[in-house]
Amino acid sequence: MPVEFDPELKSSNKILASNNAKIDFFEIDRVVEDLAKCYAAPCATTWFKIINNKRPSIQEYRAKVIEFMKEFEKILASRLPERAESSICLEHVKNLLQVEILSVANGKNKDVEKRFEYYTKHN
């Protein structure tokens, strides 16, 4: 069953105000947008290589990519200072991750789909 995509959640270069300070999340937006391509899909491929599964299903592959993507929020949360701005940033990242995860789950992330095809056909 496809998951609904909410384009309103995707905010590129969003600037949020907190305590009279403006926070530009441009850099973290780029990280989240490329997270599946540059981190989660390569990690998933490596995971399948390690367990010697040369032909995972597309659903298994996407699920593993999503698993690695979800770890990013935990890592970021554990490293940011305890400040109000960190909470704003984490909420922003959570919203962006939701959009990107739905894209992967629905087969709409072309980079994940290409990496899966390459791994299962040329392995």
Image (cartoon, rainbow, N blue to C red):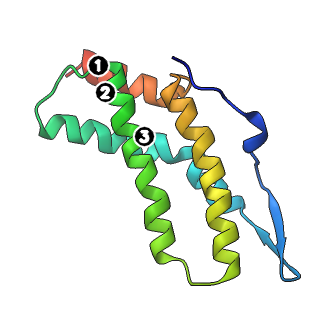
Residue occupied by mark 1: 57
Q: Position of residue 32 (x, y in %)?
A: 57, 51
Residue occupied by mark 3: 66
Q: Give the side of residue 87 with respect to residue 61, left or right.
A: right
- Examine the image and state in which quarter residue 119 appears: top left
Locate the C terminus by quadrant.
Answer: top left
123 or 57: nearer the eye? 57
Residue lying at 33% horizontally and 22% vertically, measured from the top left: 118
Alpha carbon of mark 1 to alpha carbon of mark 2: how far?
Answer: 5 Å
Residue lying at 37% horizontally and 33% vertically, measured from the top left: 63
Q: Are marks 3 and 2 in contact (CB under 8 Å)?
A: no
Mark 1: amino acid:
Ser
Q: Are marks 1 and 2 in contact (CB under 8 Å)?
A: yes
Q: Position of residue 115 (x, y in %)?
A: 38, 28
Mark 2: amino acid:
Glu
Furthest-left residue in this view: 52
Mark 3: few/some/many CA within 10 Å (<14, 14-19, 20+) = many
Mark 2: few/some/many CA within 10 Å (<14, 14-19, 20+) = few
Q: Position of residue 17 (x, y in %)?
A: 85, 71
Quick one: SS at disc 1?
loop
Mark 3: amino acid:
Ile
Residue occupied by mark 2: 60
Residue lying at 56% horizontally and 33% vertically, measured from the top left: 102
